[in-house]
Image (cartoon, rainbow, N blue to C red):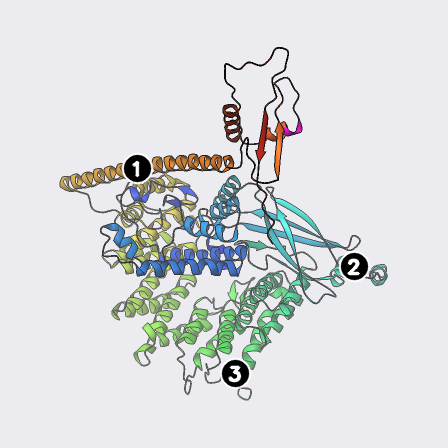
Amino acid sequence: MRTAALLDDGTTLPPLASRAARIWRGGQYAGPDIAAGGSTHALPSNVEHGLQCKASTVIYMLEKRLGPDVMQKVLKYFAGLHVRRNKKDQSSRAGPSAEVLASNARWIHTLQMFDHCRATVNLGKGEVNSFLERWVYGAGTPKLAVGYVVKRRKNVMEFAVKLEGSNAAAAADRAALAVARNHRTSVTVRMREEGRIDANDHVVSLGTTAWQLMEIPLQPRPKDRRPKTIIESGGDPELIAAMDCPVHYVRVDPEFEWMGNIEQPVKQIGLESMMAQMLEREKDVVAQTVAVEFLGRRVENGSMSAVLVLDKCLNSENTFCRVRAEAAIALGKSASAKTQWGGLNALVRHYRANQCDADTGKPKQNDFRDLAKTIVDEAVITALGLVVDSETKRSHPDALEILIERLTYNDNEGNPQSDDGFVTTIIDALARSLPPNAATLSTIVELLYLYVQRDERFPSDDMCVTCAAIRALGLLSSSIESKELRSIAAKGAELGFVLEKQSAFLAAADTKMYLEYAKSKNVIDSLDFMLECAKDRPTATQSALLWSAYDYLQTFRGSPSLQTVTPKVLKELRDFVLYGGAEVASAAFSIISFLASNDLSLDEVREAIAIAIKRAGDQVAVGVAVHQSAPRTAEEEAKRAEKEAKRARKRERELAKRSAREAEDLHAAEQRRRDAEAAYVNAMAEHVEDTQTYSEHTGTMITPGDDAPDTPATIGMKRERESVKSFVETDSAVKAEVPAAVEAPAGEEPPKKVKKLTFKLKKPTA
């Protein structure tokens, strides 16, 4: 979920689905329907991975709203539907319908699935539509900025939350509000108080405004005078309030009902102790990871207590290994002179205790049978490579000494597992380092060049050790001014080209790119080299080279050299966009977008290329999968026009058939309504007679004249349906007719008409 929330920033990932399969980029419409012509292409690997993470997260959020039992019913229904489809005989069906019915039943229409979920759990239509608009048809994830403070006098905790996000996320929120009636969203806050065994949950409503404030009542506590006594003696009231806080910790959205980023203020007093309590008491791995991340930011601000908490977590064998690895990375990133290098000292102690021999002090033989221990050891090595002195902008000598020692004395004899991954981790840590002096740099370069040739004696999986060493030489040459280093890196790159392996070729190309930047200090020259290298290469190689160049450009965001783009580079990128495959075009357009974000003069170029993409024969997502075929001949244009005409005629026939079916359905519904009314009238008429009774339960109603006031009987009669009333009056008039020859005597009033309403009473059933 955290991966999906970080990737879905409103521009990187398109929506999961669209009603008309529309093309989206950054929350904006970017072309007509794909069904109008053309075909889609496979998404790039990074976009595909992000969409898979987002889809899994959306299904998880849906399960949280429906419940596990309801979700299980829905899945059983669609699984049974797949079985029933497979049992049907497909031989009788011809044309595209047979292919569709015989295809993989994993493809389920979005509306069909959500309609079935709504019918199963009896949800409101507005709630389902708002969920669809926000998380399926919309893009972007919200950001929740939260803060809370305990008011001891009121015995409450004031909780404030601010809802933020990108433009695409705001557009998705507005769409969700537009389709839902009384749309209300909320976030769950889990709070553990002092004196309570379990944590209790509170629901904070999020309205249409950005800020929301809520007071959460706390458990009553007996008063004491200790804080007042300490304050009078000169203590800090804020620190005392933090130490005497009745709330152990607070978790926002513990059940992950929101796919969003939650930010908490780092400098708030008392929040660090809450995170330490959550890291120790909470058994949820995600909660522990959030606490480690927050404590790492506290270490960057100079908190020694946060260093001690992370050190305890790193050495705790009862904690999950991935959480311990995150603690090691946090210590390495935040190690500085503010905390007297407490993070570095914690990493060194752990390294000496777990990876070195107690008698000799040298690294022990590798033993990777314990996977959890291996993961933590690799994280410690990576963290040591991240330790940088903020004053000198160089790596710490103690950290580099440990890395060099670990790579020099690496011994995998007797280890049943391969050490290729572990060696690659050490080389990558050295590649990110900045040696403080020439002697250390010379030692690192000699060691790396030795491992460039290691695969000749001990082959690794896909030559991963050689590739890592070649890239490490290139990275060092781009960050350190040394002619000797550049010559050695060039030799390593030439060796990579000679090996005739795709992985080695990509590593050598990356090294050459780093060397081009080291020569000219212009990142555009490095990009030009990669574009030249990608020409006349297979599609997979072109895509890998362009994405590598894009990742390298990200490290120079805001650099003045990005504003020196030449027309030659733009022309080559345009050709890759228009004539390359899906992956190649996606990478090329991403590079153009990045260059345009740093140079406003390139906006027109980017828009022109985007328009050319829309006008291409195949309509696909802009910057995600783009392809244009070669120019068509006159014969091909005629065939294409004929196909378009056939499609248009087919659509017209389908619309006519649909209209006819709708008219027939409407006529049938109207006929059913008339039949139902006639049946109702006949059923009611069976119980109404004028002169006969079938039981002793007979009600007699005297119909007064027109001038007489309404009686209760007539009022009750008026409540009957109009059809029954007319039937009774017509029938009574016929039976009460007298011959025209017989006249009433003069002076006598005509007799009043008597109507008898006969009804049957049924015996009550048990």
Which span is picked out in magenta?
709-713
- The alpha-carbon separation of the residues under discs 2 and 1 comes to 69 Å
**Residue closer to the observer: 197 or 288:** 197
**Residue closer to the observer: 610 or 422:** 610
Of tags 2 and 1, the one toward the viewer is 1
The x and y percentages for residue 60 are: 50, 58
Going 51% across and 36% down the picture, which residue do you hit? 684
Within 10 Å of the Cα at label 3, are there few (<14), some (14-19), or many (20+) other Cα atoms?
some
Check disc 2 and report its element: helix, strand or loop: loop
Q: Main secondary structure of the magenta part?
A: loop
Give the quadrant of the C terminus: bottom right
Residue 220's label in the rendered image is: 2
Circle 2/circle 1 CB separation < 8 Å? no
Circle 3: residue type: Cys
**Residue 519 visible, this angle:** no
Residue 356's label in the rendered image is: 3
Q: Earlier in the sequence, mark 2 or mark 1?
A: 2
